[in-house]
Every structure is written in structure tokens, then in C-alpha cells.
Image (cartoon, rainbow, N blue to C red):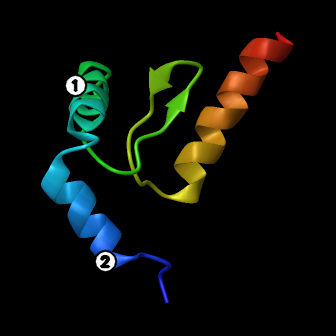
Amino acid sequence: MTGLFLSQFDECMESGKYLSKITSDREAAIEFGVNSTPTLFLNGVNIGGLKEYGYYRVRLEEALNEVDG
């Protein structure tokens, strides 16, 4: 069970209740270079989408070294 109430979902979709918020969020994401899910940011830098663990580990270690000096 997903917890999704289809009648509420359908009503929301038909009414367009959140369309302006979704559009605004989508435009902001595009502006920041988001083009996939997930997209991760580290220190405000887009480090991309789904990659292997080692890639993120290196990026995190680099960021921590910058902080520790």
C-alpha cells in the first residue's frame, strides 16, 4: 500500500492546484543545472546524478580537506 488516495490525486491533478509551484520549482532546477534525479550538490556545486560510491567518497573527502585546510 502506497498511502496514495487516487481520488485526491486525480482531483489535485485536474484542478492544477499546485501547477504554479511545480513550474517554479522546475524552472529553478533547470537554472541550477539539474537534469536528472537524483542530482546532488556539495558546497553549492552540482556534482551530478547517480554515480558509484567511490566518486562521492572522493568528492566528500576533497571538500572536508578544504575545510580542515
As drawn, 17 above or below 28: below
Q: Which residue is mark 1?
A: 27
Q: Label 1 neighbourhood size at 10 Å, few (<14), some (14-19), many (20+)?
A: few
Secondary structure state at the residue bearing disc 2: helix
Q: How many marks?
A: 2
Outermost residue on the bottom side: it is 1
As drawn, 2 above or below 31: below
Percent position of residue 67, x then y? 79, 14
Residue type for callout 2: Leu
Percent position of residue 66, x then y? 73, 14
User: Could you say which is closer to the camera, residue 10 or residue 26?
Assistant: 10
User: Label for residue 18?
Assistant: none
Figure quadrant of residue 34: top left
The residue depicted at 31 percent of the width and 30 percent of the height is 25
Outermost residue on the left side: it is 14
Residue type for callout 1: Glu
Q: CA distance from mark 1 to mark 2?
A: 27 Å
Mark with earlier residue (1, 2): 2
**Residue 34 horizontal side relative to residue 68, left or right:** left
**Residue 14 horizontal side relative to residue 12, left or right:** left
The residue depicted at 30 percent of the width and 32 percent of the height is 21
The C terminus - image quarter: top right
Percent position of residue 23, x then y? 21, 32
The residue depicted at 50 percent of the width and 30 percent of the height is 41
Q: Which residue is mark 2?
A: 6
Mark 1 or 2: the one toward you: 2
CB under 8 Å between callouts 1 and 2? no
As drawn, 27 above or below 52: above
Figure quadrant of residue 10: bottom left
Outermost residue on the right side: it is 68
**Residue 45 horizontal side relative to residue 36, left or right:** right
User: Could you say which is closer to the camera, residue 28 or residue 37?
Assistant: 28
